[in-house]
Amino acid sequence: MPTRKALALKNRNTMLHVSTLMKREAVPVLTKGANLGQNELGGFLRQVVPGIISRYGNVNAVTAADYYDTTRELFANSTKVYKATLPIFDLGFLTDSIVNYGMATFMDQGFDTIPDILSNAMTLYVAQYNRQTMDFNAGQDSVSKTVQRVAEPGACAFCALMAFSTTSAADGNLIGTRTYTYEPDFHANCHCTTEVVFEGEAAIVPDYYADFAQEYDDAQGGTAKEVLAKMRANTGRA
């Protein structure tokens, strides 16, 4: 039987693969907006952005629902029947965010940087289809205990800090990682996954979290902002 760590890694790799494919399509599509005026560019972005986000986002969402069902079957100690479903995604809000960002970039820098900047920005929203599907089903399923952010070994300092720094679990036991009753912030090109911890199950603690903990200890002294800055300076993490 696959381990929780192995399945979480597979989920993360899937998210990364989907983001890579999305950017591969988005950059040449967005490049077609070159030489358009301000009003025409806004209309062009509203035409192409929703299709890209929804196409790749839905791949992530369906994958996450299947992943939820797999982990529940393997690791939830329950005979209660549950089938993961997809939440309703606010594509209009996501489109507005990208278009507004694109137009602000256009006014400030011109068009040349827009394809790369917007394709990177869309990775956040495409990945959120996966994370929000996990979070949504955790809230619907009576045998889920909490959700957990699992960061990758090369995560930025912010993600490393968000993934491990609190050791207080929902049941009061020390588990050496951070868990949530809500979904925390993520960023573009972030490959942290949202994992569900079922009743009676321990949280996922990858071996490299020991490195995160040491980096955090080495950066102690000052405010949270200062600690984060020290982690970045000490480790070279973004």
Image (tube, rainbow, N blue to C red):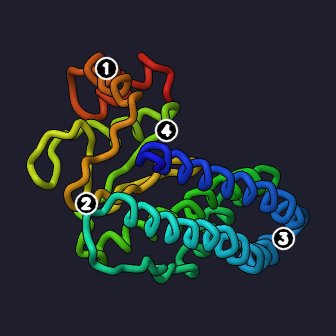
Q: Which of the two labelled residues, at mark 1 and mark 2, occupies the earlier sequence position?
A: 2
Dot 1: element: helix
Between label 3 and label 2, give the one nearer the viewer.
Answer: 2
Mark number for residue 214? 1
Find the distance from the CA under tag 3 to the CA under tag 2: 48 Å
| Earlier-in-chain disc, 2 versus 4 | 2
Q: Mark 1 or mark 3: name the one nearer the start of the chain.
A: 3
- Give SS at disc 3: loop
Q: Identify residue type, mark 2.
A: Thr
Q: Position of residue 142 (x, y in %)?
A: 23, 75
User: Which residue is labeled 4 in the image?
Assistant: 152
**Helix, strand or loop status at disc 4:** loop
The residue lying at 62 percent from left, 57 percent from top is 123
Upstream in sequence: badge 1 or badge 4: 4
Viewer-proximal residue among 167 and 2: 2
Label 4–label 3 contact, CB within 8 A: no
| Type of amino acid at the residue the image marks with label 3 | Gly
Residue at the front extreme?
1
Q: Residues within 10 Å of mark 3 (few under 14, many from 20)?
A: few
**Which residue lies under the disc numbered 3?**
37
Q: Nearer the viewer, mark 1 or mark 3?
A: 1
Q: Are marks 2 and 4 in contact (CB under 8 Å)?
A: no
Above or below 10: residue 227:
above
Question: What label sits on residue 227 in the rendered view?
Answer: none
In the visual, does 133 lie left or right of 110? Answer: left
Dividing the picture into quarters, in which one does residue 198 lie?
bottom left
Camera-nearest label, 1 or 2? 2
Name which residue type carries label 4: Glu
Residue at mark 2? 146
Q: Is residue 21 left or right of residue 7?
A: right
